[in-house]
């Protein structure tokens, strides 16, 4: 096992992430929050960045999961699943938004512009694996 950081859980609210980080640090596990300041400042960036990421060292992952999910009764599946690449099984995933690329998006955009005089930005969420550079649909919560 290495000292590489791995994703334990993601949060949409800073106080939930800080609370979980505190629980882990009370148990002697070092943990780190990624994208916390950005999402706390710009709430709309939550989906684009994939939430506030609670990261732990790879060697502490098993103990951290047991501590966070078993001892404290926190759910492992509330928005905070770990997305895996279906091609290479990596967790090094980035969420991306794609614009008018599907026929459904183009029809919805046209309908909204004509009938409501609005110009929305239609996007689809996709995931891009940073290890194999392939994209795939984001797993629903």
Image (spheres, grey):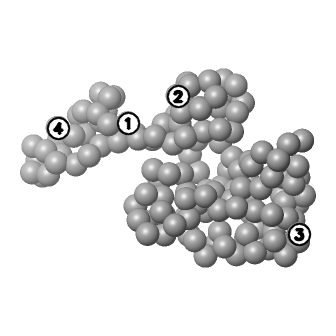
Callout 4: SS: helix
- Crowding around mark 1 (Cα neighbors within 10 Å: few <14, some 14 to 19, many 20+) is few
Q: Nearer the viewer, mark 1 or mark 4?
A: 1
Callout 3: SS: loop
Q: Which residue is mark 1?
A: 98
Distance from Cα at disc 1 to Cα at disc 2: 11 Å
Distance from Cα at disc 3 to Cα at disc 2: 37 Å
Marker disc for residue 35: none
The front one of 83 and 34 is 34
The front one of 128 and 109 is 128
Vertical relation: 115 (above or below) 70: above
Q: Position of residue 59 (x, y in %)?
A: 88, 49
Q: Which residue is mark 4?
A: 110
Q: Residue at x 48, y 37 (%)?
A: 126
Asked whether the beta carbons under mark 3 and mark 1 sit within 8 Å of each other, the answer is no
Q: Nearer the viewer, mark 3 or mark 2?
A: 3
- Crowding around mark 4 (Cα neighbors within 10 Å: few <14, some 14 to 19, many 20+) is some
Q: Which residue is mark 2?
A: 135
Residue 75, quarter of picture: bottom right
Which quarter of the rendered picture does the N terminus lie within? top right
Distance from Cα at disc 1 to Cα at disc 4: 17 Å
- Crowding around mark 3 (Cα neighbors within 10 Å: few <14, some 14 to 19, many 20+) is few
Please report whichever mark, 3 or 1, sits nearer to the chain's N-terminal start.
3
The front one of 112 and 136 is 136
Q: Nearer the viewer, mark 3 or mark 1?
A: 3
Q: Which residue is mark 3?
A: 28
Please report whichever mark, 4 or 2, sits nearer to the chain's N-terminal start.
4
Vertical relation: 28 (above or below) 86: below
Please report whichever mark, 3 or 2, sits nearer to the chain's N-terminal start.
3
Distance from Cα at disc 3 to Cα at disc 4: 55 Å
């Amino acid at each position: 096992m290495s000292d590489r950081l791995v994703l334990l859980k993601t949060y949409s609210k800073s106080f939930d992430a800080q609370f979980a980080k505190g629980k882990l640090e009370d148990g002697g596990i070092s943990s780190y929050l990624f994208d916390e300041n950005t999402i706390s400042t710009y709430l709309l960036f939550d989906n684009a960045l994939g939430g506030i990421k609670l990261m732990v060292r790879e060697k502490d992952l098993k103990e951290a999961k047991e501590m966070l999910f078993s001892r404290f009764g926190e759910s492992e599946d509330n928005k905070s699943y770990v997305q895996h690449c279906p091609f290479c099984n990596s967790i090094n995933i980035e969420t991306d938004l794609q614009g008018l690329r599907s026929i459904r998006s183009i029809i919805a955009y046209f309908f909204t512009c004509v009938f409501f005089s609005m110009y929305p930005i239609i996007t689809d969420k996709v995931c891009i694996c940073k290890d194999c550079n392939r994209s795939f649909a984001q797993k629903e919560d």
